[in-house]
Amino acid sequence: MSGRDPRHLDWGRRLAAIAQTGLHYAEGFDVARYEAVQRVAAELLAAESDADAAELGDLLGAERGYATPKVDVRGVVARGRRLLLVREAADGGWTLPGGWADMTDEPREAVEREVAEEAGLAVRATRLLAVVDRERRPAPPLPFRIYKLLIACEACEPDAEPRADGVETLEAGFFDPADPPPLSEGRTHREHLAIVAERLADPGLGAHLD
């Protein structure tokens, strides 16, 4: 991102949201106008993120309805003072297990499923530790705003060993949150680990809210 203006990414996201919401309500000639705004948003985002404008245009065009942030759920599974992390196949970085919340899932179901799929552990979601905004911490740019729900989970079998699925995740293990392996920062930031570790150590603390 050296030499780039972060405001341009923000403007691109805002234009994309305006276009998506506009298309939801538009009729007649307004449809073409909002589609043009969407193309401009894709070009601006591509220029600021080294992405392909046509691919970004397709991605933005696939979004329907009133534009809202996306929801990412992350399971926080502790073993002593260590936290469960998985290594992503996509970029080789480590992260709390999780991913997009599906439309058919309750938050509890979403995070329990993600931990089972990515780390091979059956867990029970117990409480919300934090709601964080991806934009608040350095991460590779994306065209959408993302809210992350960091949810404490208890292993149904406390001694069970985690295992990666070999497709989305390559390794899984427990690590000191103060000294983690190289992170996939768009998914989990060091500050996220500090936030949840603090709340696991002191159950009296309320959930963190960005």
Image (spheres, grey):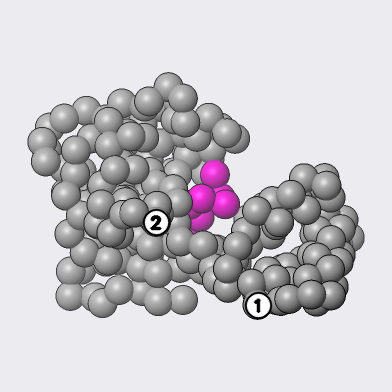
Magenta residues, start to end: 184-193
Q: x, y percentage for residue 179?
A: 42, 46
Q: Residue at x 40, y 36 (%)?
A: 86
Q: Nearer the viewer, residue 39 or 27?
A: 27
Q: Quadrant of the N terminus?
A: bottom right
Q: Residue at x 30, y 66 (%)?
A: 129
Tell me the number on the disc at residue 25.
1
Distance in Å between CA atoms under marks 1 and 2: 22 Å
Q: Mark 2 highlights which residue?
A: 103
Q: Is residue 50 visible?
A: no
- Position of 107 compared to 192: left or right? left
Amino acid type of the residue that numbered disc 2 sits on in the rendered structure = Met
Can you say whether 51 is above or below 126 in the image? Answer: above
Within 10 angstroms of label 1, few (less than 14), some, or many (20 or more) residues?
Answer: few
Can you say whether 21 is above or below 145 in the image? Answer: below
Magenta stretch encompasses residue 190: yes
Q: Residue at x 27, y 31 (%)?
A: 120
Amino acid type of the residue that numbered disc 1 sits on in the rendered structure = Tyr
Q: Residue lying furthest top in this view?
A: 166
Q: Nearer the viewer, residue 50 or 12?
A: 12
Within 10 angstroms of label 2, few (less than 14), some, or many (20 or more) residues?
Answer: few
Residue 201's image quarter? bottom left
- Position of 93 compared to 154: left or right? right
Q: Residue at x 74, y 49 (%)?
A: 58
- The answer to the question of whether label 1 and label 2 lie on touching residues, with beta carbons closer than 8 A, is no
